[in-house]
């Protein structure tokens, strides 16, 4: 079947929750995808920051196939070797002592929310998050998400969630009450337009948490697992959270999420407190082990930082060439954004569609930036090709 045949059939059976590109992806290799019509695309979206090692990475493919031929699932009533190995790798390479495995970022954040409440004193249940944040699609995680558009139509929201203004430490402190138990934030907000939180601000949040005996939860679902140029984003910030959540790249496309914390906090969860039927599935964890072992090899993050700088420099050159459309560049490692001017923002969706038609995948994030999140194995030659196509698109973009 070709693209249109599969799209037509899909339209009859799917609930309309997605605005999809008119392509049916059937194969991937490295930073390339191929659709059902045989057309190739350069992937600077990575399944929304998921395929960190690209498509069909040999180590991941081998690990998944070997584990699938041995054991698919037994539930968490039993131990499995891939789950234990991945947990050990996470603990040995982070601040954490303990891990809970889930299937997604939303589930990892749900676990963090529940743990923060259970650990805290009676009557302390409120969690403060930031304007512009995104923490998932469950009721609790959209309540924690600081964007009203994700909450519309699902009211009333679960109580116990407070949103503070972005990057305003004084306002954040005023939001703390005797009922507050934690502050939840992303070190860099991906969905609202690739907005990094300044080190000084994050350090101020850490100080507020210490002062008021609150837990600091870092949502590293999009920026963890190498995306910013280190295994975890917090490592670059001089700020250590009490709880950290991961997903997306930890499974390179398989459903896997994780919540990490310290021994003291983890002790609040006992058998029956929280659970997941599929969390830490052996096949997903086998992939996670292969991903971790690949990323921890010498030189991997040096290369991510090198190509990240190369991408940032290339985007910056375009802002100088097209100042009426592009106002700057921001990001870290290989999550980079071309900040659009008001005139450029009006054309953002059209720019992404033009890139798609020319075989480059990216997206318009937060209605303000073009976001580029390629696999961490992207080459400078592939970045050059993307920049050439983007240059063509910007040249063709007309503003009033």
Image (cartoon, rainbow, N blue to C red):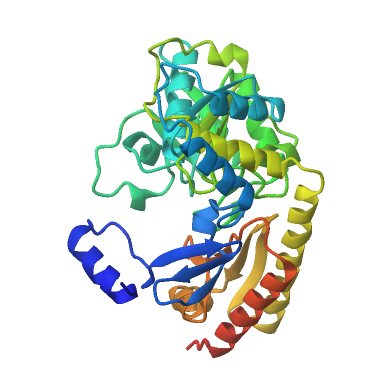
Left or right: 80 as drawn, with respect to 58: left
Q: Nearer the viewer, residue 91 or 133?
A: 91
In the displayed structure, 334 sits above or below 158; it is below
Q: Quadrant of residue 237?
A: top right
Left or right: 13 as drawn, with respect to 255: left
Image coords of residue 396 (percent x, y): 54, 89
Q: Nearer the viewer, residue 352 or 377?
A: 377
Picture mark count: 0
Q: Residue at x 50, y 18 (%)?
A: 79
Image coords of residue 143 (percent x, y): 37, 38
- Tell me, yes or no, if residue 179 can be seen here: no
In the displayed structure, 336 sits above or below 397; it is above
Image coords of residue 328 (percent x, y): 66, 69
Image quadrant holding the N terminus, namely: bottom left
Q: Residue at x 46, y 33 (%)?
A: 109
Q: Residue at x 72, y 60 (%)?
A: 308
In the displayed structure, 339 sits above or below 167; it is below
Q: Nearer the viewer, residue 73 or 95?
A: 73
- Tell me, yes or no, if residue 227 can be seen here: yes
Image coords of residue 27 (percent x, y): 48, 64
Extreme residue in the front direction:
69
Left or right: 10 as drawn, with respect to 399: left
Q: Nearer the viewer, residue 282 or 265?
A: 282
């Amino acid at each position: 079947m070709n693209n249109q045949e599969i799209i037509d059939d899909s339209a009859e059976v799917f609930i309309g929750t997605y605005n999809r590109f008119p392509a049916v992806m059937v194969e991937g290799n490295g930073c390339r995808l191929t659709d059902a019509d045989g057309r190739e695309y350069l992937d600077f979206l990575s399944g929304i920051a998921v395929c960190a090692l690209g498509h069909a990475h040999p180590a991941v493919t081998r690990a998944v196939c070997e584990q699938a031929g041995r054991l698919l699932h037994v539930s968490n009533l039993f131990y499995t070797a891939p789950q234990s190995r991945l947990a050990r790798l996470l603990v040995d390479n982070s601040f954490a002592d303990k891990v809970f495995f889930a299937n997604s970022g939303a589930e990892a954040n749900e676990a963090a929310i529940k743990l923060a409440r259970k650990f805290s004193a009676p009557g302390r249940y409120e969690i403060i998050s930031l304007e512009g944040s995104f923490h998932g699609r469950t009721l609790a995680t959209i309540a924690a998400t600081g964007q009203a558009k994700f909450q519309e139509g699902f009211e009333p929201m679960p109580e116990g969630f407070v949103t503070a203004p972005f990057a305003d430490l004084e306002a954040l402190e005023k939001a703390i009450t005797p009922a507050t138990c934690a502050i939840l934030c992303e070190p860099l907000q991906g969905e609202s337009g690739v907005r990094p939180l300044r080190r000084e601000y994050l350090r101020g949040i850490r100080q507020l948490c210490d002062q008021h005996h609150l837990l600091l939860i870092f949502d590293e679902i999009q920026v963890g697992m190498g995306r910013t140029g280190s295994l975890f984003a917090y490592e670059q910030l001089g700020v250590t959270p009490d709880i950290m959540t991961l997903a997306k790249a930890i499974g390179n496309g398989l459903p896997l999420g994780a919540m990490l914390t310290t021994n003291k906090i983890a002790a609040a969860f006992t058998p029956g407190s929280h659970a997941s039927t599929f969390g830490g599935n052996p096949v997903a964890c086998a992939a996670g082990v292969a991903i971790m072992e690949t990323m921890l090899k010498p030189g991997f993050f040096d290369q991510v930082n090198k190509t990240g700088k190369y991408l940032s420099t290339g985007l910056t050159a375009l802002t100088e060439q097209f100042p009426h459309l592009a106002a700057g560049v921001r990001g870290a490692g290989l999550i980079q954004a071309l900040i659009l001017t008001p005139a450029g923002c009006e054309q953002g969706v059209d720019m992404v569609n033009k890139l798609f038609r020319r075989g480059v995948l990216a997206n318009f994030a937060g209605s303000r930036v073009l976001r580029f999140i390629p696999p961490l194995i992207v080459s400078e030659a592939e970045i050059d090709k993307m920049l050439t196509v983007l240059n063509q698109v910007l040249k063709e973009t007309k503003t009033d």
